[in-house]
Amino acid sequence: MGDPLFSDGINLAVLLIVALKVLIVFAFLLVSVLLMVWFERKVISDMQNRIGPDRAGPWGLLQTLADGIKLFFKEALLPDQADRRVFRLAPYLSIVPAFAAFAVIPVGGTISIAGHRTFLQLADPPIGVLFLLAMSSIAVYGIMLAGWASGSKYPLLGSVRASAQMVSYEAAMSLSVAAAVLTTGSLSTHAIVAGQATYRWNLWILGVVPFVIYLIAATAETNRPPFDLVEAEQELVGGFHTEYSSISFALFYLAEFMNTVTVSAVAVTLFLGGPNGPHIGFLPDLWPVVWFFAKLLVFLFVYVWFRATLPRLRYDQLMDLGWKKLIPLALYWLLLIAALRVGRDQGWNVGVVLIVGVALGALAWAGLGAALRQGETAEVGT
Amino acid sequence: MGYLDGFKVTFKQMFDDRVTNKYPDEKRPKPARLHGRHVLNRYEDGMEKCIGCELCAGVCPARCIYVRGADNPPDEPVSPGERYGFVYEINYLRCIHCDLCVEACPTEAITESKLFEFSFTDRQDAIYTKAELVVGDDGHPQKLPWEDWRPGDEKNTSAWVRATAPSGSAAYEGRVAWSAELGFGIRAPEQAQEDDTPATPRKSAAPAKPAGVVAHGNPATRGPSKSKGRA
């Protein structure tokens, strides 16, 4: 299938439309970061009975812009011990995947520009979900290399934490995403959204579990509280970006918030039906976009809510949660959904499949618990 | 709900009142006894109250006051009486706003306003001269450019505690009362601040006992009963 834009071959008009979409996505992401920082600061102030930024612009909307401009005028420091080229490269390795990941997110339905029908989505590759996972993997490099190249101990500790954390939670995240891919039978984000039409959202089609796992894993993946050990101020100064200043620091900051927006958009796409929503008579092209952003906003609010509520996890708790709880649970749920699908294709009784699945799950859970206890006592013994 | 209780708490806080004061736009009311920058008061006829006795300078623990007294010129006296403050300077880089100068002053010439938000950019500006300290013809302090005066602030220029006389009020006979704020004009005596009992004895307080015994715990009549005991 793919985007109908390319069905009649590629000509100048098509290229211009693609360039326009690129520009819009780029500008949207920059503005969204601007607003996200403001939104986060305002909401968290509300939750702490404060007022928050209200000096720059109406309701402090321009505060982020002012901070950004200030950062750009600051001196870009280069530590003496730094690996110069990698140190300079790292922020870009962090920001480029953050921009690129949003390219496959469908923000609306199909519209026509100058006679050309096209998706409201920058690109719809057949491997869309794989592309998202690949981008989130590359983002690890940005953080890891930033800490490594700084030639300083706190950034190094931060980056070691970051790479361990992001690699661990990527497994749980991929397994929960795989569940969504399994029901749709396609890796294309557009097809996944289309498969959730008429409120058959993956959120309840899959049971809520993969969604919850994705939410937790995505929080860890973006290094947001309560999983922000990577930049735990109390322990590591600024974590991996301690040695960064000026534009390089701004890029990391930008990437961090852009990733928050992107993982929220991915969650909306994979689990909440993306731009699907009630159809309203007038302006039919506009409403899907509105639904998409409304869902996105709910997610962003939830992330800020997490930050205001939850204290930071200890490192071993983080690893326990990732490896001993989320990954086994995500794996089990994926197998259960696969079993249900196979059962449906083979004409098995759904009830029997469920009972056997749950029984096996309980058995596996008990076995895992026993193995973990064994491991702990063995550790004490040696 | 266990883990999720915290989410309810933070969500509820969103609809709670804000604790933030919008400081430069809105200020909190200042305490009655706040010690701010000084003023040199004048009598209603325009004469200065300062007599140049230098007691304030002598008592000042920070040595921030410099006073030189001089004889009043006979044809054009500055203050009633023999002497007046010829030079009067306070260095606000030294002043600790302890208010001892105000307590030492025999003529209530120096009092403190509640102004503490003044930021000079020059050491010379930190030394307030007599011309800057003395109140204007309306009895209100002068407003210097680097001071943050708000409307109504000029009325609070005597934030110091003094004992007020009973002023003939029977209810205050024999009890020490305080006025936190001297202000302008004649003020009625006020109750002691740590004592919340009303000046007139309440009828409901222990009605079975005779008046003399009831008065035992009442500071308003303690003085006379003591003197009676002594006699």
Image (cartoon, coloured by chain):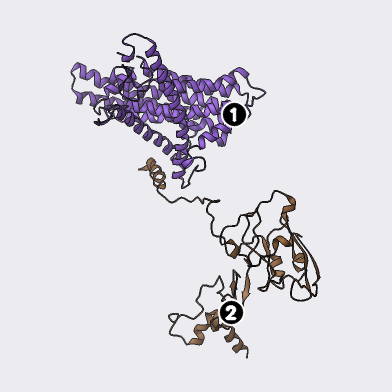
Chain colours: A purple, B brown
**Residue name at image x 52 percent, y 83 percent:** B215
Q: Nearer the viewer, residue B137 or B147?
A: B137
Vertical arrangement, residue A257 with respect to residue B11, above or below: above
Q: Chain of mark 1?
A: A
* Residue A85 image offset from top left, x and y in percent: 60, 17
Is residue A72 shown left or right of residue B52? left
* Residue B110 image offset from top left, x and y in percent: 69, 67
Residue farthest along the top direction in this orientation: A9
What quarter of the picture does the N terminus of chain B occupy? top left
Callouts 2 and 1 in the same chain: no
Is residue B196 shown left or right of residue B67? left
* Amino acid type of the residue tagged 2 in the rendering: Arg
* Residue B70 image offset from top left, x and y in percent: 81, 69
Is residue A235 shown left or right of residue B206? right
Residue farthest along the front direction in this orientation: B75
Q: Chain of mark 2?
A: B
Q: Secondary structure at mark 2?
A: loop
- Picture quarter containing residue A213? top left
Visible residue check, residue A374? no
Residue farthest along the bottom direction in this orientation: B231
Vertical arrangement, residue B40 with respect to residue A293, above or below: below
Total numbered labels placed on residues in the image: 2
Q: Which mark is residue B175?
A: 2
Q: Which mark is residue A246?
A: 1
Q: Nearer the viewer, residue B62 or B122?
A: B122
* Amino acid type of the residue tagged 1 in the rendering: Ser
